[in-house]
Amino acid sequence: MEFKHFSASSYLLKVHGATGSLFKGLGAISLNTSLEVKRKIKEAHPDLGELGAIRSGIIAQAETAKQINLVWVIITFVLSAILSPTVFYLGQSLKISDWEHESRMYIYKEAIKSVEVDKQAEYLSKAISEDAVKFMNELKMLQEAQGTVLLILIGMLLLGFSVFFLRYQWIISLKECIDNTYTDQEKMIAEKKEEEKRIATTLKEKEEKELRDVAKIVEIRNRRLMQKY
């Protein structure tokens, strides 16, 4: 038999309906699906050679999925390294606001000299309030930008991890299903061969017994003939 699908999992999904519990190749296959897949596989591949090829393909995919764990750890480490300077850059961004605040305060000190004495307190209060509002707006913008970046990164990580985990569940459940099917098929073929061997031995013993009986009958007949003459 020639398989028309590239991978064992694709063959089991598209030909034998080995769908996951969530969606196609995501999530572990259910018990009913596992039983149905086993039945179809046994009917379609009574020969251990074909079933062994499917089993080898699934085992290889399961091992690959395990290795992806290492890649996932590396990706997480790289993202952590990329995000680590964020605190430093946020601090540097706020320093610019501090410099602007200091420069404006210097300007206020120079400008207040031209303001009437009774209005100086009002002028400073208004200027400082405006400066504080501007600073808070800039801080809020930085916080929102940081929050957006974190939400995007966390969302991407969670989505990627969820897809990988569900796919891994599906592959592992397929592997267990095929392993059990292969073991059952191997046991059934061994029992069938043993039964055929037992039947062949029984038939051989029966034939040998019949031959001995015939030989004994012939011997008795010959003996009687010799006694008669």
Image: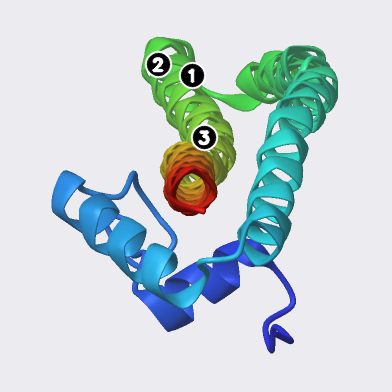
What is the CA distance from the residue labelled 2 to the residue labelled 3?
A: 42 Å
Q: Is residue 54 above or below residue 40?
A: above
> Residue 18 appears at what percent x and percent y?
36, 64
Question: Counting other residues with Cα less than 10 Å from the Cα at mark 2, is it few (<14), some (14-19), or many (20 or more)?
Answer: few
Q: Amino acid at mark 1?
A: Ile
Whichever of labels 1 and 3 marks the residue nearer the N terminus, that label is: 1
Q: Which residue carries the number 1 mark?
A: 128
What is the CA distance from the residue labelled 1 to the residue labelled 3?
A: 38 Å
Q: Which residue carries the number 2 mark?
A: 125
Question: Counting other residues with Cα less than 10 Å from the Cα at mark 1, is it few (<14), some (14-19), or many (20 or more)?
Answer: some
Out of 114 and 217, give the one closest to the viewer: 217
Quadrant of residue 145 in the image?
Answer: top right
> Residue 12 appears at what percent x and percent y?
49, 69
Question: Counting other residues with Cα less than 10 Å from the Cα at mark 3, is it few (<14), some (14-19), or many (20 or more)?
Answer: few
> Residue 19 appears at what percent x and percent y?
33, 64
Q: Nearer the viewer, mark 2 or mark 3?
A: 3
Residue closest to the far front: 229
Whichever of labels 2 and 3 marks the residue nearer the N terminus, that label is: 2
Out of 34 and 193, give the one closest to the viewer: 193
Q: Which residue carries the number 3 mark?
A: 154
Q: Nearer the viewer, mark 1 or mark 3?
A: 3
For numbered disc 1, what is the local secondary structure?
A: helix
Q: Amino acid at mark 2?
A: Ser
Kindly indicate whether the residue at mark 2 contacts the one at mark 1 (C-beta within 8 angstroms): yes
| Count of numbered badges drawn on the protein | 3
The residue that appears at 68% across and 39% down in the rendered structure is: 65
Out of 146 and 56, give the one closest to the viewer: 56
Q: Amino acid at mark 3?
A: Ile
The residue that appears at 84% across and 18% down in the rendered structure is: 81
